Image (cartoon, helix red, strand yellow):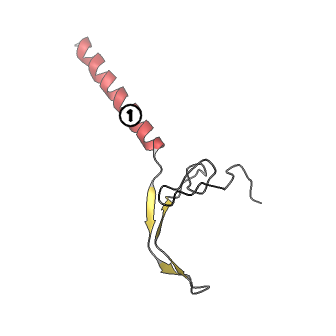
Amino acid sequence: MKKYFKIITTILISLVLLLGISGFADARIARVRGYVRKSTGTYVMPHYKTTPNKTKFDNFSTKGNINPFTGKKGTVNPFKIKF
């Protein structure tokens, strides 16, 4: 009985760690449909962006990241404080 408990516990811990790491590793990506800006009448082409969250470090425009769709390097400093 102890042997089965040990095996099940090991499997459950492994699954929790695996799911936690995989969720942290990839930034979620959202598709934005093309639209017309009401203020200027300018058409904005369809594009992709990272889904909104509470961190600035996984955005395509942040230094150290590369936009996988355009190949552009990020230029925004994530440590700059806005006032």
What residue did someone put label 1 on?
A: 18
Q: Residue furthest top?
A: 2
- Number of marks drawn: 1
Quadrant in the picture for residue 81: bottom right
Where in the figure is residue 80, as x and y percent of width and height?
73, 52
Q: Residue furthest front?
A: 71
Q: Quadrant of the N terminus?
A: top left
Where in the figure is residue 3, as x and y percent of width and height?
25, 13
Position of residue 52 in the picture relative to residue 6 (left or right): right
Residue at the spot 66% in from the left edge and 56% down from the top edge: 75
Q: Is 69 situated above or below 65?
A: below
Position of residue 42 in the picture relative to residue 13 (left or right): right
Instruction: Say which amino acid is labelled 1.
Output: Leu
Q: Is 50 situated above or below 5?
A: below
Q: Under tag 1, what secondary structure? A: helix
Residue at the spot 77% in from the left edge and 60% down from the top edge: 83
